[in-house]
Each structure stands twice: as C-alpha cells, then as structure tokens.
Amino acid sequence: MKITHTPPPRANDPEGNDWFATATPLAYNVASTGHSGYFANGFTDTYDYWKLVPPATDSIYVHVWSDSTLDVDLIAYGPDTTSSLVYDGRYGTYSRLGISATAGLTYYFRVNRFSGTAGSYSIIATRSSLATGVGKNKELSLIPRDLVLEQNYPNPFNPSTVVQYGLPASERVRITIISLLEQEIAELANTVQTPGSYRVVWNGKDQQGKDMPSGIYMIRLQAGSTQHVKKAMLVR
C-alpha cells in the first residue's frame, strides 16, 4: 500500500470537512488527501473530520502521514461524537490509532494540526495495523528498528516540551526527568508498551507539581536493559 502527497491547489481550505456533520467518507485501503493550516471563511483550518462505516464488526486502523511542515494528531470518536475513543498524539509526521468497531455504525476521525504551518497530509483506513506510506521519496517505517529517544521539542522550552520515543519491541518503559546531580525530579511514564512511536509532555514541574527553575535537565528513557538520555533546557 503506497500513499503520495499532493500539494494544496489554493490558498483556502477546499475540503469543508471542518465538523462531524460534514465529515469526508473513508473507504478501506483507499488513500485520501487533506490539507491543514489554510483559511476558510476567516477561520484557521485546524481540524479535519473523516468518517467510516464498517461493513462488519472489525478492528479499524487509521494512518495519517503529513508534510514535514505539519505535526498532526489523530482522534477517534464513536457514533455519538460526544467523547473521544482513543487519541494518538506522538510528535512528528505520522500518527496511527486503532479501534474495535461495530458493523453499520459510523465512526469519526479528527486530524488535528498540533503545530506547524500549512501543508497537506494523506489518510488511509485499514483492517490491519500495518500500512506502507511514501513521503518525499522515501518509505516510512511504522515500527522503529531500534530503541529511539528523540531530542525534545522545543528546546530550550517554557513552559512545556514534547518527548518523542520509539520502541522496536514490547517493553516496560520508564521515562524520568533527572537533575545534573542525578536526582529524580519527575516520572513521565512507567508502563508496558507495544512496538511503535510515542510521545509524552513534560510541563516543567516536579512530581509534586512545583515549577522547576531554569536550568539543564536530563530526560532518561529506560526500556528493558537499555537506556537513552537527552539534555533539555528550561528557561523561565
């Protein structure tokens, strides 16, 4: 399965799928293109809504790839649209989520422009957790080959920063913030996670909710017997 991007054809948002009632239909294994960050009727084009009616009770997986100018999040809603079912907010140009769906009901998927300027994205729904996407002349791997801890962004930061990491296999993951004296300040994650890419946010506070002062802190990722560390600079 391959996905290609097409550049936006005009300055204004052409889709009009800015709410549940005007959501664009999705079909299994058919890639669609959307645009985010453009203007329509004087409002910023921040959200796009898509919908799918599964013909059978099944697991639905939705994948989104975006241009390098966009960081997109993905949120799934049930037929009542009142509360979200699952959310994928990893940092970067790829998001994926899966839900258990009932035949004949309508499910909605919101593509949210978390950050970045105007750009395009591709979206596809599958019955498998795997799909292959093509960005700017290179294939995107859904599961990292090695344990990865990306540099936090933004850095320096105030008041919060995003930490992205990737797991090649199921592991218990623990992410902590430590001082240069190796004192533990906060715990961001401590759970078993399946292979994939994830992100967490540090709000610049310690475990008791107290604001930490300006300085350099260490972000430590521990998964199994392996650990990675990155430096983060907090500027008040």
Image (cartoon, helix red, strand yellow):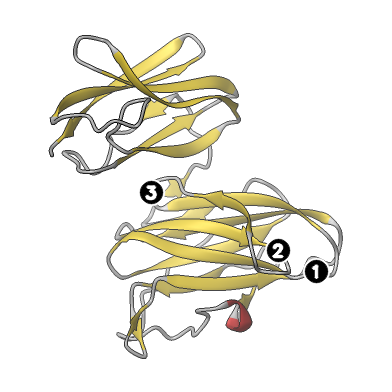
Q: Compared with residue 201, is residue 176 higher up or lower down, i.e. above or below?
A: above
Image marks 1 and 2: residues in contact by CB distance under 8 Å: yes
Do residues under tags 3 and 2 come within 8 Å of each other at their CB atoms?
no
Residue tagged by mark 2?
Answer: 78
Q: What residue is disc 1 on? A: 105
Sequence order check: which comes first, mark 3 or mark 2?
Answer: 2
Left or right, 128 with reference to 37? right
Give how far apart the Cα atoms at labels 1 and 3 are: 31 Å
Label 3, on which residue?
92
Q: Secondary structure at mark 2?
A: loop
> For the residue carrying disc 3, how many other residues have a C-alpha within 10 Å: few (<14), some (14-19), or many (20+)?
many
Taking the spot 60% from the left edge, 72% from the top edge, the residue there is: 50
Single out the mark in the foreground, 1 or 3. 1
Measured as percent of width and height from the top left, residue 169 is found at 57, 24
Q: Quadrant of the C terminus?
A: top left
Q: Earlier in the sequence, mark 1 or mark 3?
A: 3
Give the quadrant of residue 163.
Answer: top left
Identify the residue shown where x is 38% and y is 48%. Answer: 92
